[in-house]
Amino acid sequence: MHILVPVTGKEVVKAAVLTVSDRASAGAMEDLSGPAVAKLLEGAGFEVAALDIVPDDGARIAAWLKARARAFDLLLTSGGTGLAARDVTPEATAGVLDYEVPGLAELMRQKGFEKTPMAALSRSRAGVRGRTLIVNLPGSVKGATESLEAVLPLLEHAVDQLRGRAKHA
């Protein structure tokens, strides 16, 4: 049995975006993927209240996720999802999740694969910590934005479910 909580007005979804990149965190290159992800989110009506950068370091990624999950509805990371030895974002994310939401990562890979077979190499993860949805995106601007576009229509409903406010059909 589902208990439905009436929605009295649309609440803004508060989001934070983290770019995971050794070079961008050191100032050796400009972060383009984080701002591109933030722009897409804002265009869809989400409030992006934090845009941060950390190096490819599992402990730093996990610490950011834990800290931000206390204050945000949605956390998106960009980068560190490939096969290189320094690509540790999925493992750092797995270590802080209460549970995974594999359908989101599967959908991102499926939609990406329609454009390039390289999408099959993405190790992106999605899941929940507390009442916060966490989604890993690839690090390239194209990969990050296409992956986000694949799941963007689902994010508000997912957050509403986590808040206990989703309407059931």
Image: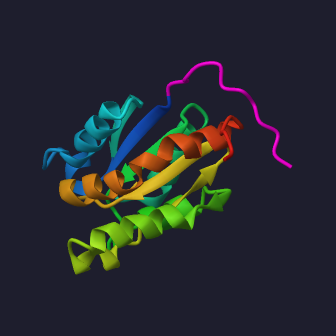
Q: Where is residue 109 in the image (x, y as percent from the top left)?
A: 37, 70
Q: Residue at x 33, y 58 (%)?
A: 147
Image position of 84 (left or right of 141) = right
Q: Which residue is drawn at 52% across and 66% down?
A: 103
Q: Is residue 152 located in the magenta-colored stretch of the structure?
A: no
Q: Quadrant of residue 89?
A: bottom left
Residue at the far top in the pictured view: 8
Q: Residue at x 54, y 34 (%)?
A: 72
Closer to the camera in the image, 61 or 127? 127
Closer to the camera in the image, 47 or 111? 111
Q: Is residue 8 located in the magenta-colored stretch of the structure?
A: yes
Q: Can residue 69 be seen in this view?
A: yes
Q: Give the range drawn in magenta.
A: 1-12
Closer to the camera in the image, 81 or 169? 169
Main secondary structure of the magenta stretch = loop
Q: Can residue 21 be seen in this view?
A: no
